[in-house]
Amino acid sequence: MSEPRKIVIVGAGLGGASAAAALRERGYSGEVLLVGADPHRPYELPPLSKGVLLGNTDEPDWVHDEKFYAENDIRFGAGVTATRIELGARLVLDDAGGEHRYDRLVLATGSRPRQLPVPGGDLPGLYTLRTLDDALKLRSAFAAAERVVIVGAGWIGSEAAAAARTHNADVTVVDPVPVPLATVVGETVGGVFRDLHVSNGVHYRLGEQVAEITGGPDGVRGVRLAGGEEITADVVLIAVGAAPRVELAHAAGLELADDGGVAVDAGLRTAAPDVYAVGDIASHFHPRFGRRVRVEHWANAKDQGAHVAQNLLGENEPFLASPYFFTDQYDLGCEYRGLADPATDELVVRGDLAAREFTAFWLRDGEVAAAMNVNMWDDGDALGALVDGRAKVTAEQLKTADLASLT
């Protein structure tokens, strides 16, 4: 494979920016074009629901400093949306009238917040959280609000609830699940997060459905539950997950996987010649799991973006990194590595759940499928090695042995 003359990267978030930087780090001297719809230069998303929403900072973590792109000869188009891809002509068109031919193409278009498909779900005044501008607007709303309703008890909903309580708002979280985060960490560990929020004054309406967003042209008034009760609110945040932005890829004829992402192989290549996908939209065949995996977390976008650069330049290396994410809520911080199925994997807890100082492991066929350290920070490298190595261990060893010795 000869070195490409021009590489176009559609999507200027963490995945796209990481790919552009890695190309230059590998000595690529051809043209690099990075375009994205956000008006800001590339930034990382985790601080939006943490430091920015809490009011600790007005800025996210920028992927690179302001001069980086010009200094590294990366053409960067902020606020530019790609509107069409013509695979046969190797052409990307954008809403500014640009036509960009490519030798290699990377799609890193990320995700958008899901809407709530109920009456009133499109009312003006509803909040979602995805961009820096979203976070700044929501922070101002939390600071002025007396009552906040958050629809969704996942990671974003939970972090937003912590931020709203920090701003002294009365907070109610509504979700049809019986325990927050149960689909990711199971009911036992999810119960730790529930109890944490309850102890900080959050009201939960779990096992209940939102039937309607109430209000009118002047704004949102609250939410009506399926049982008929209305919960009034100054601010309603919809935090019911994210949908991959695959419309551009789908319209171009790229294959979509069952999980809604763009189907890519172990090396992040689509079936179309010289077209790759990374980050939230990539439904990646992961050799470690033997199936497709689509991960919407910060580390995945960063690592896949950096990884794809070598394959753009002629290599064919599989992406093998395990999923990773972290969260901070009140005085609880944790890191999660791996990919568990809490419905079927065996949960092993080392430490004290009630004190919120523990490490949770999920065992599958005697191997460590995932590990999550909560307010315990000394064993990160060992946990990564146990997950990446699919270590064969017993529950008793995980509870009592020196973790580094098990790797």
Image (tube, rainbow, N blue to C red):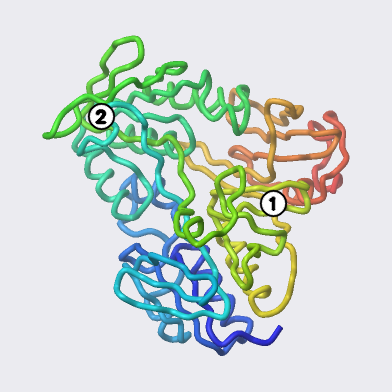
Q: Amino acid at mark 2?
A: Gly
Residue 372 picture location, percent across and down: 65, 39
Q: Quick one: SS at disc 1?
A: loop
**In the displayed structure, does residue 103 sit left or right of residue 56?**
right
Q: Quick one: SS at disc 2?
A: loop
Vertical arrangement, residue 149 with respect to residue 36, above or below: above
Residue hosting label 1: 322
**In the displayed structure, does residue 397 sit left or right of residue 361?**
right
Residue hosting label 2: 120
**In the displayed structure, does residue 88 sit left or right of residue 380?**
left
Q: Residue at x 73, y 35 (%)?
A: 361
Vertical arrangement, residue 182 with respect to residue 75, above or below: above
- Nearest to the observer: residue 401 or residue 180: 180
Q: Amino acid at mark 1?
A: Ser
Q: Quadrant of the N terminus?
A: bottom right
Which of label 2 and label 1 is nearer to you?
2
Q: Residue at x 31, y 75 (%)?
A: 97
Could you tell me how far apart the alpha carbons at marks 2 and 1 are, in whole angstroms? 39 Å
